[in-house]
Image: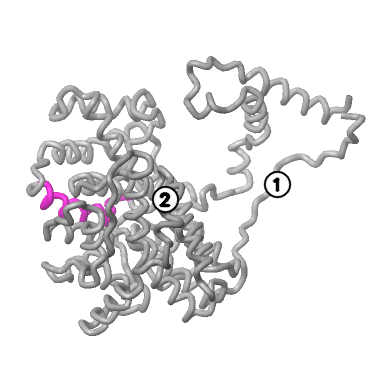
Amino acid sequence: MNETDAIVQKLDQEAREQIVIDEKKLGPALLRVTPRIRELAAICEQNNVIDRELYKKYNVNSGLRDQYGKGVLAGLTNVSDIQAKKLIDGKEVPCEGKLYFRGYEIKDIVKGFDENSCTGYEETAYLLLFGSLPTKEELSEFRRILAQRRDLPQNFTRDVIMKAPSRDMMNNLARAVLMLYTYDNDADDISLPNVLKQCLNLIAQLPRLVVYSYHAYNYQKLGDDITIYAPKPELSTAENILYMLRKDHHYTKLEAKILDRALVLHMDHGGGNNSTFTTNVVTSSGTDTYSVVAAALGSLKGPKHGGANIKVAHMFEDIKRNVKDITNEAEVRDYLLKILNKEAFDRKGLIYGIGHAVYSINDPRADVLRSMVKDLVQEKHCEEEFALYSLVERIAPELIAEKRHMFKGVSPNVDFYSGFMYSMLGLPTELYTPLFAIARIVGWSAHRMEELQNIDKIIRPAYKPVSPVREYIKMEDR
C-alpha cells in the first residue's frame, strides 16, 4: 500500500468512526436518511474540509468580501448604490448609511411620494427600469402597461399553480416562472426590447403568482376553502396584493401605503447583493430571462438573504416564550446572551436582524421602516411588542460588540422590522420572502438589462486548487 492509499484509508476510517450517532439526537431529515448515506456523508465532510489558514495564506476574500466587509469590485452599475463609508484624510471611516436608486437617496424618494398614494412601487420601478423619475403622464401610462400584463396564460393557474403546490412559496414561484418560459414564443431572444417585455410581464405577474400559490397550498394541504380573485386594473401593486390575499378584500389606506413603501425599500440594494450578483452571473452566460429570474429566486430563498426576516420573526417568538417579563431589560439581556452563546433559539450564535455586510452605523431602509412601524403599531395596538423590538434594538449591538471581535459596528438591518410589520399587516410568514421577490424582481430586471447592454465576458472567478496531485490507482490495486 502506497502513502496515498494509506491517507485515503485513514480518512475513510476516521469518517466511519465519527458516525456513531445517538439516533435520538438526529433531526427528522436525518432520520429519513439511511445509515449508509450518513456514513458516506461523513466521508464527504472529511474530504471537503479546507484549512482556514489557507484562505489567509493565499489572500482569498471569502464571500467576495475582505475582513472589513468590503466587497471585491466585480463590476459597474448605474442602477443603485450604497454608501456606508467616507474617505477622510485618506482613510475610510464609517458614516451614516445611504441607499441610492439611480442617484436619488431612498429616504428622499419615499418622502417625495404623495402622502395618500399607494403607487410608490410603480413610481420607483419606473425609475429603476428607465433611469428617471416619471411624470404624472408617464406614471399613468406605466401603471396601465403593468395592469395589462397581469393576466396569466390560459389554464396556467389550474395546470401549474394548483397542481403539486409546495409548502415553500419560493419553490412554487421559481417553478411557475420556469413554466412561463414554455408559453413564450420568443423565450430565448435576449434582445433588449424582448427582455424588457419579459421583465415587465414578470413584474406584473409575480404578485398574482405569489398569492395564488399561497391559496393553492392552503387548499391542497391544509383543507382551507379557496376562492381566487383576479387583480383589479385600477388598484396599485400593493393594494392588489391585499385585495387578492384577503377573503373579504378589505384593507385600510395605511396598510396599503405601508406595504407599498416596504416594497420600495426592498426593490434593489446595490449590485453586490447575492441575488443580484446571481442575476448578473447567469445573465452573463447568455441564457433566457426566465432562467435568470428562477436562479435569483433560488438565491433570495436562502435564510442568509431573503429569508432573514423570517428568522427574526421566529427569534422574537422564541424570546417571548422563554423570557418571563419581556419588559424587564435584565431578563431580555440575559436571554440575548444565551442566543449569542449558542445556548438558545437555533444555537447558531446569531441575533437575527442586527448587523449588515456593508452598513455599520445604520441601515437607511431600517430607519424608514421603523418610522412606518410606529404608525402601524398604533392602528394595530401592538405597543408592547414594539417595546420589545426597541429594547432588543438597543441592547443587541452592545452585546455583539462585547462578545465578538468586530472590525465594524452593527445596527438593525431592514429585516429587523420587516417581519414585525408584515405580521401586523396579517400577512402569513410563508409570504415574507415572496414579498421580497415581488419587490426585488424590479432590481433584477434593471441589472439584467444593464448586464446585457454592457456584457463583455462570462463571469468566471478563480478558485485556487489546494488538493495534492495524486497518481491514478487501477481498480485491482485499490
Foreground: 266 or 76? 266
Question: What is the crowding at mark 2: few (fewer than 14 residues within 10 Å), some, or many (at least 20)?
Answer: many
Residue at 47% from the left image edge and 52% from the top image edge: 299
Range of magenta residues:
360-377
188 relative position to 196: left or right: right
State how far apart marks 1 and 2 are (Cα). 34 Å
- On screen, 254 above or below 387? below
Element at label 1? loop
Q: Is residue 87 visible?
A: no
Comparing 198 with 269, the one in front is 198
Amino acid type at circle 1 is Pro
Magenta span dominant secondary structure: helix
Where is residue 65? Give x, y as percent.
49, 52
Query: Badges 1 and 2: C-beta atoms under 8 Å apart?
Result: no
Q: For residue 376: magenta?
A: yes
Asked whether, in this view, residue 174 is left or right of residue 1, the answer is left
Check residue 193 for magenta coloring.
no
Q: Is residue 197 above or below residue 432?
A: below
- The amino acid type of the residue labelled 2 equals Met
Which one is in front in this view, the residue at disc 1 or the one at disc 2? Answer: 2
How was this image coloured? one colour
| x then y, percent, for residue 35 | 62, 22
Tell me the tag on residue 465: 1
**SS state under label 2:** helix
327 on left or right of 198: left
Question: Circle 2 is placed at which residue position?
Answer: 170
- Residue 6 position within the rendered picture, expressed as x and y whole percent measured from the top left: 81, 25
